[in-house]
């Protein structure tokens, strides 16, 4: 039975949340500011009065929560709080941007416009989410607060995602992991980034998340005791040096622990650095660096440091403004412990990101590398013709990357992502220098344009007016700026060739008694699978479409067979199988029987949790839910995702690959093959074993019936003493 809604109780709760919001505001918030906030609150309450969330709560709870996160967790001021309260008003109610501008001014109207989702219907091959994300970034040219409020909005949506159906959970969580968590990281919002990642994992890999969370809870008390024991001598020594400080331990995020387990193929118990110790010193700005190094000296007096694990972001801050000393030391019981050392100012920036950075900048600090990065994003956004998905993928390239520091011949310092090439550096200097780059000298020596740079390199670019950008450059550049500028230049060249190509196509079709009109153009695009008219006429212009191919097209068209092909490939739905077909996988809630192919990127087998993805050319491709591409597909193309499930466990053979590691003992491989071939009667497709210094690693590709059978096989192999780990991999031989 549904409980009746207690309206009076809800009103009291709304008022309590509003009072909590005011308490979260900065101490500098004036009475006048609070009046304007109250005005925005009243409008939001009125606008959303008849609306409820999926959880059944009044909708006003959401903008109040977003405003609270903006104020307390990000440290934003009055303008942002007003925008957070009103961020859904224009999109979901009768209020317009003009109403907002009339009540609160143009600045707030601009920010809310950036926060308002796109209402128009786009080309179905373009992700609406990607377009929304791009529109939000466009407002960077006006106000970075748009993105900060959007992150607060996304964080609250993730915190309340339990109320949504599973497909919606997967879509939103995938977008979060693919775009929003990296963006929070890039803006220095580490606590928010960490929570977004953990929540993203919670909804995309629920069982994994629960298992790690339970393990962390079990070891919590043990962890607290260890941190106290580790910190005791440090506290005493730092006090002797008359420094004002705090020291605390924090567990690593569930997401980062899981990544370490996957990347290193180890279980939870074998991860030793499950927590970090943070020391924050309250020092004036002119002594904070020396105080950080003083504390580093104290730490390394008591505990032996790993010299390869020192990270000095005090001398050279990260591009997002992050400053700290990180070192990993050996505890007295042989455990590695990460120690982070930073000042109160540095800690504020690390916790509140751009908002704190901006606050300190107001006090007279010079422009930081974070400002430079925002300028780069603005530059990237200048290309209005770029596809939204391409833009997002290029933009994402530089969100999580590490940094290297490169010098110009004049001694100027440039920051680039790790694995950046000599050509990336040329584009970093100036677009024209990149486009005309014909050679590069690194430390006085001539290198290829694809040469990967290292921190400390001094780089000189050689240009020529005769040089033109080439398509193969896109293979090795890594910065979004370089990729964007190369694509834009290539597109201009392509357009020129396409103009000639269209004239050529007209003449050739006229010769075959066909007129080139919009209908014929559409049919040509579909027949030659070019995707658009530009690519079609470019191929005509370059001679990629031969005369026999054009003649074949006209024959098919005249026979009427072309229409059948077109419907098969491009129809709104993949064609249904006949009743005689094997029923292996069914799709959607009504168990539709559709044609499909198993994706080669993850090679699903019966028993795997799967989904279908509707491609443009190849129909439905079936992926594992933990496929490396799953996050990206769900984020950018959620409308093409089809829920899928196995309905039979047919005795068919599917390809699966396992990675096997252990100690190289006499007769081990014979025992492995005996179990696989004789005991389990499994066909080995290929085997590749490497042995080095008593340790062996092998990749074995098998043909198995289903995931349960594969599990049974790996369990048997794990019982062999010499084998340390067996994992399933994605790449087949």
Image (cartoon, helix red, strand yellow):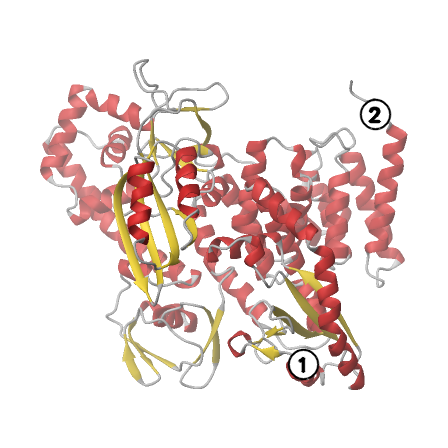
Please say if 446 is above or below 257.
Answer: below
Q: Residue 346's spot in the image, x, y percent?
A: 68, 72
Q: Which mark is residue 103?
A: none
In this view of the protein, which residue sits in the foreground, 287 or 509? 287
Q: Is the residue under label 2 in contact with that under label 1 (CB below 8 Å)?
A: no
Q: Residue 723's spot in the image, x, y percent?
A: 41, 53
Q: CA distance from mark 1 to mark 2?
A: 61 Å
In this view of the protein, which residue sits in the foreground, 247 or 189? 247
In this view of the protein, which residue sits in the foreground, 374 or 711? 711
Residue on which disc 2 sits:
5
Q: Residue 530's spot in the image, x, y percent?
A: 27, 40
- Left or right relative to 231: residue 625: left
**Residue that sits furthest to the front in the current view:** 666
Tell me which residue sits at (58%, 52%) in the image: 255
Tell me which residue sits at (77%, 50%) in the image: 68
Q: Nearer the viewer, mark 1 or mark 2?
A: 1
Helix, strand or loop under label 2: loop
Q: Is residue 38 visible?
A: yes
């Amino acid at each position: 039975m549904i409980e009746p809604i207690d309206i009076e109780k809800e009103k009291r709760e709304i008022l309590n949340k509003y009072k909590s919001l005011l308490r979260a505001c900065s101490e500098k918030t004036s009475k006048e500011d609070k009046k304007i906030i109250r005005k925005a609150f009243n409008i939001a309450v009125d606008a959303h009065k008849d609306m409820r969330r999926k959880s059944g709560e009044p909708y006003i709870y959401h903008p109040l929560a977003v405003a609270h996160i903006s104020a307390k967790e990000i440290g934003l001021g009055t303008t942002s709080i007003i925008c957070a309260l009103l961020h859904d008003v224009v999109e979901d109610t009768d209020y317009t941007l003009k109403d907002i501008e009339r009540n609160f001014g143009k600045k707030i109207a601009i920010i809310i416009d950036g926060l308002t989702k796109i209402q128009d219907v786009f080309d179905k091959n373009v992700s609406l989410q990607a377009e929304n994300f791009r529109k939000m970034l466009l407002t960077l040219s006006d106000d970075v607060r748009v993105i900060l409020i959007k992150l607060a909005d996304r964080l609250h949506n993730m915190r309340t995602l339990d109320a949504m159906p599973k497909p919606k959970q997967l879509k939103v969580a995938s977008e979060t992991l693919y775009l929003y968590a990296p963006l929070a990281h890039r803006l220095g919002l580490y606590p928010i980034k960490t929570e977004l990642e953990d929540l993203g994992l919670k909804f995309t890999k629920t069982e994994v998340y629960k298992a790690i969370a339970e393990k962390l809870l079990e070891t919590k008390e043990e962890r607290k005791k260890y941190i106290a024991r580790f910190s005791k001598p440090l506290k005493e020594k730092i006090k002797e040096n008359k420094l004002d400080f705090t020291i605390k331990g924090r567990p690593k995020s569930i997401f980062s622990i899981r990544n370490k387990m996957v990347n290193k193929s180890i279980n939870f118990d074998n991860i030793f650095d499950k927590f970090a110790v943070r020391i924050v010193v309250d020092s004036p700005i002119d002594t904070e660096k020396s105080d950080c190094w003083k504390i580093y000296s104290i730490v390394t007096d008591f505990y032996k440091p790993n010299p390869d694990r020192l990270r000095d972001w005090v001398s050279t801050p990260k591009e997002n403004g992050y400053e700290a000393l990180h070192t990993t030391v050996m505890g007295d019981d042989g455990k590695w412990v990460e120690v982070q050392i930073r000042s109160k100012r540095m800690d504020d920036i690390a916790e509140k990101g751009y908002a704190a950075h901006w606050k300190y900048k107001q006090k007279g600090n010079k422009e930081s590398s974070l400002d430079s990065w925002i300028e780069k994003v603005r530059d990237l956004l200048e290309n209005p013709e770029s596809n939204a998905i391409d833009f997002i993928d290029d933009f994402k390239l530089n969100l999580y990357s590490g940094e290297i520091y490169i010098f110009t011949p004049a001694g100027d310092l440039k920051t680039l992502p790790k694995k950046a090439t000599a050509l990336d550096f040329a584009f970093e200097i100036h677009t024209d220098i990149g486009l005309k780059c014909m050679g590069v000298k690194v430390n006085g020596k001539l290198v290829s344009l694809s040469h990967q740079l290292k921190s400390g390199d001094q780089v000189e670019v050689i240009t020529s007016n005769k040089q033109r950008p080439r398509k193969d450059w896109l293979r090795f550049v890594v910065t979004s700026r370089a990729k964007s500028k190369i694509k834009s230049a290539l597109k201009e060249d392509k357009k020129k060739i396409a103009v000639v190509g269209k004239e050529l196509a007209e003449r050739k079709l006229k010769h075959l008694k066909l007129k080139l009109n919009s209908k014929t153009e559409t049919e040509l695009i579909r027949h030659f699978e070019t995707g658009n008219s530009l690519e079609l006429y470019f191929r005509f212009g370059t001679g990629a479409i031969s005369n026999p191919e054009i003649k074949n097209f006209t024959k098919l068209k005249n026979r009427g067979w072309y229409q059948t092909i077109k419907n098969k490939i491009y129809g709104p739905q993949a064609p249904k199988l006949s009743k005689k077909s094997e029923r292996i996988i069914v799709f959607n809630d009504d168990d539709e029987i559709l044609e499909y192919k198993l994706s080669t990127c993850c090679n699903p087998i019966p028993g795997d949790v799967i989904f279908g993805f509707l491609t443009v050319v190849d129909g439905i491709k079936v992926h594992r839910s933990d496929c490396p591409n799953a996050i990206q597909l769900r984020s950018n193309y959620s409308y093409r995702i089809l829920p899928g499930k196995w309905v039979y466990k047919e005795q068919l053979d599917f390809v699966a690959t396992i990675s096997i590691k252990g100690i190289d003992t006499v007769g081990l491989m014979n025992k492995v093959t005996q179990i696989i071939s004789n005991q389990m009667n499994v066909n080995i497709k290929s085997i590749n074993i490497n042995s080095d210094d008593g340790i062996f690693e092998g990749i074995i590709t098998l043909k198995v019936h289903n995931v349960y059978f594969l599990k049974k096989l790996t369990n048997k192999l794990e019982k062999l003493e010499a084998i340390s780990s067996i994992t399933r991999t994605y790449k087949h031989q």
